[in-house]
Image (cartoon, grey):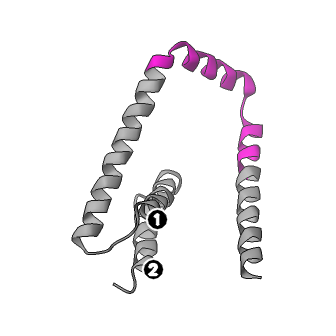
Amino acid sequence: MKGYRKTLFGLLRLAIGLAIIAFLVGRMDRQQMLAALREAVRHWPWLVLAHALMGLALLAVLIRWQRVLNALHLNLTWGRMTAIFWIGHFFNMFMPGGTGGDLLKAYYTARETAHQ
């Protein structure tokens, strides 16, 4: 029963996320969005470079956070640490204020390492 509830909750979260994306895309000016996409495609090497540099920056932050956790003897697997990192990054990007995601990372890390 618990697995069923977890699956249902996951599907509900997915549906809410897709509904929000559909709502936001529906409010966009399609002509302006297509013009921006055409411009991005025209300058695709810069777009690829920007994504590569952003990926490297995020990887550096993830490695730094892993080292901080190791220094505090809070051992998480790379997979779980990466998942918590992306949750925190999402909230830092889309929530007002600069600490929401960091507080969530601290909460999830404390919850996962309570035995330590």
Depth check: give the residue in front, 44 or 96.
44
Mark 1 touches mark 2? (CB < 8 Å) = no
Identity of the residue drawn at 40% across and 84% down = 114
Q: Looking at the picture, how far across and down is residue 51, in whole percent? A: 45, 32
> Which is in the foreground here, disc 1 or disc 2?
1
Judged from this view, the residue extending furthest toward the bottom is 115
Q: Quadrant of residue 12?
A: bottom right
Q: Secondary structure at mark 2?
A: helix
Q: Secondary structure at mark 1?
A: helix
Q: Looking at the picture, how far across and down is residue 42, in whole percent? A: 55, 12
Q: Is residue 37 above or below residue 91?
A: above
Depth check: give the residue in front, 41 or 91.
41
Identity of the residue drawn at 44% across and 58% down = 82
Which residues, given as a range, are shown in magenta? 20-45
Residue that numbered label 1 is attached to: 80
Answer left or right for 47 relative to 41: left
- Count neighbours of disc 2 (C-alpha within 10 A) and say few if under 14, some if 14 to 19, many if 20 or more: few
Per the model, the C-alpha gap separating discs 1 and 2 is: 12 Å
- Count neighbours of disc 1 (C-alpha within 10 A) and say few if under 14, some if 14 to 19, many if 20 or more: few
Please, what is the dominant secondary structure of the magenta stretch?
Answer: helix
Amino acid of disc 2 = Arg
Amino acid of disc 1 = Arg
Q: Is residue 70 magenta?
A: no
Judged from this view, the residue extending furthest toward the left is 71
Q: Is residue 41 magenta?
A: yes
Q: Looking at the picture, how far across and down is residue 37, in whole percent? A: 62, 22
Residue that numbered label 2 is attached to: 111
Q: Is residue 87 above or below residue 27?
A: below
Depth check: give the residue in front, 53 or 102.
53
State the count of labels. 2
Instruction: Give whichever of discs 1 and 2 has the lower sequence position.
Output: 1
